[in-house]
């Protein structure tokens, strides 16, 4: 499948979120239903990583957490962030190949972020919507809590519409050549033992 809009992306993200919550276990393995190395496979993995990390972030904020367990979780979150970056770059590579033959218009402009990093924000937004809906539907809280959460959910839904529109418009710009598709790797330094002074200083 060639994915040039958010319409086919949203169901994949939401499928991964729903699939995770069937188990609600940060240690449950990802059972990706899509063909390996396809764009759908990458998108599903992206949403699964984000969902697991969402819940890891919840766990580490337990005020009674054991310090050793907190350190283990922190390192797991660091690895998750690197996995997230790696898969975003793979999604960007997909779009780079998709648009590589498009001839830029003479007045073509650059965008502040690549398609995959915009899609990354869309994935996180689906998690916010999912969990805010859960707050609205809780039966163990009062109406004031539900009302406040519904107001937040309304804002999130508006953000979702706006972000989908912006991503769809960006794809059209790349297709027409009015924007130039460029990808920059994140060049994260803190995970690299050759670039983090705390790590290479231990040699």
Image: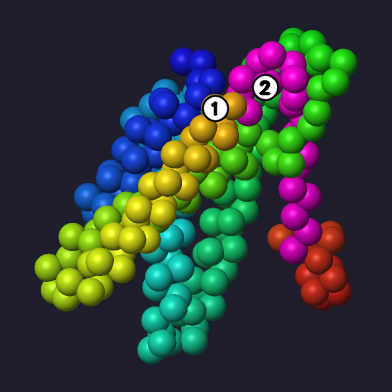
User: What is the quadrant of residue 155 in the picture?
Assistant: bottom left
Residue appearing at x 17%, y 71% in the figure: 143
Find residue 168 and name its label. 1
129 part of magenta stretch: no
Rendered image coloring scheme:
rainbow
Residue appearing at x 80%, y 28% in the figure: 109
Horizontally, residue 139 falls left or right of residue 39, namely left
Q: Are the residues at dot 1 and dot 2 in contact (C-beta closer than 8 Å)? A: no
Crowd class of label 2 (few under 14; some 14 to 19; many from 20; radius 10 Å): some
Horizontally, residue 134 falls left or right of residue 191, namely left
The mark nearer the N terminus, 1 or 2, is 1
For the residue pair 199 and 160, the one nearer the viewer reads as 160
Residue appearing at x 63%, y 28% in the figure: 170
The picture places residue 132, in percent across and down from the top left corner, at 32, 59
Q: Which residues are magenta?
A: 170-190
As measured in the structure, the alpha-carbon distance from the residue carrying label 1 to the one carrying label 2 is: 9 Å
- The residue pinned by badge 2 equals 173
The picture places residue 59, in percent across and down from the top left corner, at 39, 73
Q: Main secondary structure of the magenta part?
A: loop
């Amino acid at each position: 499948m060639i994915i040039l809009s958010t319409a086919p992306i949203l169901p994949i993200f939401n499928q991964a979120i729903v699939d995770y919550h069937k188990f609600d276990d940060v240690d449950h393995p990802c059972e990706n239903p899509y063909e390996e190395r396809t764009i759908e496979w990458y998108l599903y993995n992206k949403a699964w990583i984000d969902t697991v990390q969402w819940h890891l972030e919840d766990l580490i904020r337990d005020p009674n957490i054991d310090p050793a367990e907190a350190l283990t979780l922190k390192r797991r979150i660091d690895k998750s962030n690197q996995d997230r970056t790696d898969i975003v770059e793979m999604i960007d590579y997909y779009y780079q190949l998709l648009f590589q033959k498009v001839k830029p218009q003479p007045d073509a402009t650059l965008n502040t972020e690549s398609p995959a990093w915009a899609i990354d924000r869309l994935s996180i937004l689906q998690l916010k919507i999912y969990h805010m809906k859960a707050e609205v539907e809780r039966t163990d809280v009062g109406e004031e809590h539900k009302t406040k959460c519904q107001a937040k959910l309304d804002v999130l839904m508006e953000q979702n519409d706006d972000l989908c529109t912006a991503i769809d418009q960006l794809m059209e710009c790349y297709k027409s050549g009015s924007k130039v598709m460029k990808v920059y790797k994140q060049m994260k330094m803190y995970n690299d033992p050759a670039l983090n002074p705390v790590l290479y200083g231990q040699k």
